[in-house]
Image (cartoon, rainbow, N blue to C red):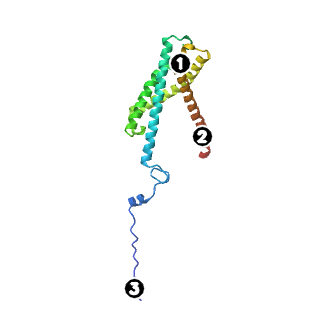
Amino acid sequence: MPPKTKKSSKSPKSKPLSKTLKSISPIPGSLGGPGGIDNATATSIKSTTLLFAILIGSIALVINVYAIIWIYKLESIDCKCSNSWMRLYIKYYLHVIIPVMSISLLINIYLFLNNMTYRDITSDLFRLYRLFVGLINFLGFINIIISIIFINKLKEINCECSEDIKREVYFIYNIILASIISLIILFALMSIPLALSTAR
């Protein structure tokens, strides 16, 4: 009998790991994946978000500057019916929030012009600043409530010396802020049962 020929035990050459990984499609919905967001779109979204923050920040800054002008006007004309601790609180809060808003606006403009995000800033001083802003935001929540009550009382007692377009704008501004915060809290409370059900 003729001798059996040995079959070649050599298997087809396997692809290197790097080529194999490159050939795998990205996860659907991920950055660069099918139906996902590419780098250009992600950058565009970040830029649009910053631009929106700059616009809203500028409007809020102008409103708060006009509010402090209104408060000083009440003091200068010695408006007796507006003289209360609430007016004093609003005054001191505005003295703090206006510089903070100005700094935040400048940071947003810098980030927008340099195509950066807050994550790109790794300075410890900036982290400390963000903690300070968090505290100011808490005091701001109190200021919203006080401002609405204060201006509403002025309207109820028909305080003529406090009447000003600046007062009305600041009143509407605080009502809008209160509505936004209320909606955020409402959605957060509504999401708790959903989160608990999915955790089970």
The residues tagged by marks 1 and 2 sit, at their Cα atoms, a distance apart of 41 Å
What mark, if any, has residue 94 been given in the picture? Answer: none
Name the residue beneath numbered marker 3: 3
Identify which residue is drawn at 38% across, 37% down. 113
| Residue 164, numbered circle | 1
Image quarter in which the N terminus is found: bottom left
Q: Nearer the viewer, mark 1 or mark 2?
A: 1
Residue type at tag 2: Ser
- Looking at the picture, how far across and down is residue 193, in whole percent? 62, 41
Q: Is residue 3 visible?
A: yes
Q: Residue tagged by mark 2?
A: 191
Q: Is residue 132 left or right of residue 162?
A: left
Q: Quadrant of residue 10?
A: bottom left
SS at circle 1: loop
Front residue of this view, candidates 48 and 184? 48
**Mark 1: amino acid:** Asp
> Label 1 vs label 3: CA separation?
110 Å
